[in-house]
Amino acid sequence: MEFLLSDVHDDLASTVDALLTKADIPSRARAWIEGDHQPVAQVITALAETGVNGLLIDESCGGASAGGIEMVVAMEQIGRHALPGPIVETIAVLPVLFRSAGVSGERVSALAEGEIATVAIPPVAPLAPIAETSYVVHDGVLSTATAGELVATVDPSRVLAELLPDTTLADDVAIDDAVDIGTLATAAQLLGSAGAMLALAADYAQARKQFGRAIGSFQAVKHHLADVAIAIEMARPLVYAAALGIDGLVPEDTDVRRDVAAAKVAAGDAAHLASRRSLQVLGAIGYTTEHDLSLHLTKTRALLTAWGTPADLRRRVLESL
C-alpha cells in the first residue's frame, strides 16, 4: 500500500506549519489558559481562510470536500504546535456528525468560516472542551447544548464540561463515523505532538553540555531519542492507513473501525513515550510552564483518553481478531 504523501499534501502541511509558526502558538496557548480566547480564535479564523476548517465540509456549504488524509495532514501540524481549544470537535467531528444527521446550511457554513464549536457524544466522549457553540448527542438525538459544571483536566488549556441538551436538531443520528473521525483526528494530534517533543529534546541535547560535551553525544541519550523516533515512525503508517480507510480507499473487507482504534493506540503510545523521554533529557526545566515542552506534556496526557481510552480501543482491536 502506498503511504507517500502527494505534493498537494506536502503543500498543505507546509502552509499550516508556516501559519502556526508565524502565529507563535505557545504565547497564544498561555493566553487561552489565562482566559483570553481571542488570540486563538484569530488563528482558527486564519486556518479557516486557508480551507483547513472546511476540509471535511462539502463545497456546497463553503468547504473543500476533502477527506480523512487531508484532515490528518492538517491535524498533525496542529498537534505539533499544541494549538488549544476544541480543535478536533470543530474541524473533524462536527462536520461528519452534521453530514450523518442531515444538518446543512448556516450551521455547517459557520464551521467552514472559522466558528469554534464543540460536541459531546456519550459514552465515548461524555465531556467536551468548552466553546460558545455546543452540541450533544444523546440516544441518537442531536441537540444544541449548554454547558453544565466545568471540569479541569491535567491540561490547563483543556477545560471540559458536561453538555446539557437544548433544542433538538435531528433524530436517529448515526454516530460511528463521527466518533471514528474524532478518534483519528486525536491520533494525528498526538502524532504531531510527539514529533514536537522529540524535536525539543533533540535541540536541547545538542545545546546542553556536561563534562565539556553536548549531552546528545552520550549513548544513553541517543538511545532514548532513537526509541521515540522509531515509535513515531511505526505509528505514522497506522494513522495514514486508517485515514485511507475513512476515505474508502481500502479493500471492502477492511475493518476500518479497528484500524482507527489501532492508529490512536499507536500514536498515543508514541506520544506518551516522547513525553517521558523528552522530560528525562530536559530535566526539571521541562516541567516549568515557561518551557514549551510543558504545553505538550499536559496536552498529551489529556488527549490519551479523548475520543476513546487506550483500554477501550485495545479491546476493539482484540475483539476484531
Image (cartoon, grey):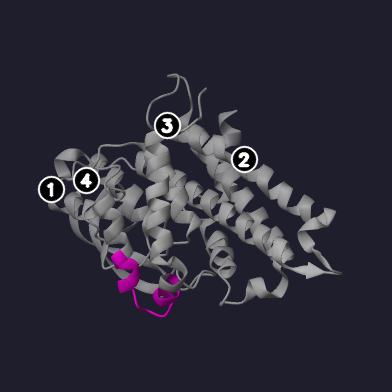
Q: Nearer the viewer, mark 1 or mark 3?
A: 3
Q: Nearer the viewer, mark 3 or mark 2?
A: 3
**Which of the two discs, 2 and 4, labels the residue nearer the N terminus?**
4
**Which of the two discs, 1 and 2, labels the residue nearer the N terminus?**
1
Q: Nearer the viewer, mark 2 or mark 4?
A: 2
Marker disc for residue 6: 3
Q: Which residues are magenta?
A: 29-42
Residue 10, can we see it?
yes
Residue 38: percent from left, percent from top: 30, 73
- Residue depicted at x 84% and y 68%: 212
Front-most of residues 103 and 294: 294
**Which of the two discs, 3 and 4, labels the residue nearer the N terminus?**
3
Residues under numbered marks 1 and 4 in contact, where contact means CB atoms less than 8 Å apart: no
Give yes or no for residue 83 being in the magenta stretch: no
Q: Which residue is mark 2?
A: 233
Marker disc for residue 105: 1
Residue type at tag 4: Asp
In the picture shown, does residue 57 fall above or below 27? Answer: above
Q: Quadrant of residue 217?
A: bottom right
- Residue depicted at x 31% and y 60%: 44
Say which element carries label 4. Answer: loop
Q: Nearer the viewer, mark 1 or mark 4?
A: 1
**Which of the two discs, 1 and 3, labels the residue nearer the N terminus?**
3
Residue 205: percent from left, percent from top: 72, 62
Say which element carries label 3. Answer: loop
**Which of the two discs, 1 and 4, labels the residue nearer the N terminus?**
1
Locate residue 283 relative to residue 150 in the image: left or right. Answer: right
Residues under numbered marks 3 and 2 in contact, where contact means CB atoms less than 8 Å apart: no
